[in-house]
Amino acid sequence: MPTKVPLLKNHVIICGFGRVGMEIVRLLDEKEIQFIVIDNDIKVVERVRELGYRAIVGDATRTKTLREASIDSAKAIAIAMDNDAKDLFCVLAARDSSKGIYIATRANDDFARDKLVEAGANYVAMPQKTASKEMIRELFKPV
């Protein structure tokens, strides 16, 4: 049975509440930006709710779940699952549900990044590359 979520507008949908999703939530909360978390694990959703945040249990790759999160009035969606195939299906569902929504996601390799962009992602982060660049920058920083 769908969870009743108060109407949201100009909010961000976060798909997945792992390490990346948690950090996105922390940053959005800091900036006082409205958001809702989607996760398919009821225990994770209960933990998110205990923290005082909106969350629904569901499969973010399904249009029905995205509608429950008010995708039609959202300004952005952050797809933070660590599974390139699921991320791709989520991008497809999000783009199909809302042509103008800004879609940010993650990829584990260049092939996945290219496919996610083709599917409609506006931005694709590659955590391994970002971390590597950051480490190199620190290693060669003037002392």
Image: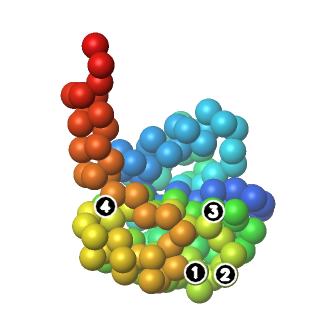
Q: Is residue 4 left or right of residue 80?
A: right
User: Mark 2 to mark 1: distance in Å?
Assistant: 5 Å
Image-quadrant location for residue 13: bottom right
Residue 122 in the image: x percent, y percent? 54, 69
Image disc number at residue 99: 2
Q: Nearer the viewer, mark 2 or mark 4?
A: 2
Mark 1 lies on residue: 95
Image disc number at residue 76: 3
Judge the density around disc 3: few (<14), some (14-19), many (≥20) Cα neighbours within 10 Å: many
Judge the density around disc 4: few (<14), some (14-19), many (≥20) Cα neighbours within 10 Å: some
Frontmost residue, 119 versus 33:
119
Q: Amino acid at mark 3?
A: Ala
Residue 94 in the image: x percent, y percent? 56, 77
Callout 3 secondary element = strand
Q: Is residue 58 left or right of residue 133?
A: right
Query: Which quarter shows the C terminus?
Result: top left
User: Mark 3 to mark 4: distance in Å?
Assistant: 19 Å
Q: Earlier in the sequence, mark 3 or mark 4?
A: 3
Callout 1 secondary element = helix
Mark 4 lies on residue: 82
Q: Residue furthest front?
A: 142
Callout 4 secondary element = loop
Q: Amino acid at mark 2?
A: Lys
Q: Residue at x 39, y 48 (%)?
A: 20
